Amino acid sequence: MSSRSSPAREVELMLVHETESGYVSGSGSESSLPEIHFTKPHLAFLNRQLQFLEPQDILRWCITSLPGLFQTTAFGLTGLVTLDMLSKMKLPRPQMVDLIFLDTLHHFSETLALVDRVRSRYPLVNLHIYKPDGVENAAEFAHKHGHRLWETNDELYDWVAKVEPAQRAYRELQVAAVLTGRRRSQGGKRGDLDVIEVDEAGLIKINPLANWSFQQVQNYIHQNEVPYNELLDRDYRSIGDWHSTQPIKAGEDERAGRWKGQQKTECGIHNPRSKFAQYLQEQERKKKEAALQKALDGLEIAS
């Protein structure tokens, strides 16, 4: 009879060892490790420390501190600066930060051309592209969801074009933390932005250039010859979908060209859970309650 212990027994002994020692190491079982989370005092402490650091130092902290780290980008100027800074750190492959791009199928042609130029400039970076579920182009999107959905139901549009694809990306890629291109100088709700945030779903969001002005970002782009969207040379500043983005006038906030004439300032990705998402959640809750009631009714009939 073999004296070798079974794999199950080895796992059991490892767990006992960890329990007896009182410590858990990263090389031990994953089941005994807690997920990353920050208490409010810890988060406040981190923000006090990080706000005095240069973006490159914030990025280094993220890489060494946050597993499941990705960069979400629509290839705006700030995201391009972050991408270029990361590329200059000469990181080994396991530490490189992958990109997530949400192709709403309604981007400007200039934005899509920029995607190709970025791929050429940074060939080592993995780019994950997510589209609205079940469609590949704008015509299919209109056929499935109706013509000009952004006008007939903008919350539904945000959900199917941006929020749901983002949530799908986070789930499939096992994203725990994301680098964003948001800055305080962009105005609106971003005026009091922290460097590090945690949303209601537990996703950690880091804004490494939160302290930078548009001029600082633009200077970096030119000094480092970073490829950028040609629309920026035509008085555009914050660039999203073609139907909700316009050039701005002198003296206007950077994001004044987004959803012009509307009260809206965010697309839903950086907002608390959207009303449509809340509706879907409520529908799912009712479905589960109905299924439970049906099962209980069946038990009563059987008895």
Image (cartoon, rainbow, N blue to C red):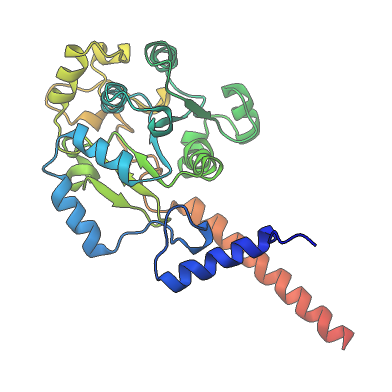
96 or 284: which is nearer to us? 96
Whether residue 70 is visible: yes
Q: Residue at x 32, y 15 (%)?
A: 229
Name the spot of residue 16 as percent of width and height, x first.
53, 70
Q: Which residue is farthest right?
A: 302
Q: Residue at x 30, y 28 (%)?
A: 79
Left or right: 236, with 118 as reference point: left
Left or right: 214, with 169 as reference point: left
Q: Compared to 230, does 61 lie above or below?
A: below
Left or right: 266, with 35 as reference point: left
230 or 149: which is nearer to us? 230
Q: Quadrant of the N terminus?
A: bottom right
**Residue 140 falls in image quadrant:** top right
Whether residue 265 is visible: no
Q: Quadrant of the C terminus?
A: bottom right
Name the spot of residue 120 as percent of width and height, x first.
42, 10
**Residue 270 falls in image quadrant:** top left
Q: Compared to 129, does 233 lie above or below?
A: above
Q: Which residue is farthest bottom?
A: 303
Q: Residue at x 27, y 25 (%)?
A: 89
**Residue 87 falls in image quadrant:** top left
Name the spot of residue 20 as percent of width and height, x first.
45, 73
Q: Compared to 278, does 143 lie above or below?
A: above
Name the spot of residue 78 as percent of width and height, x first.
26, 27
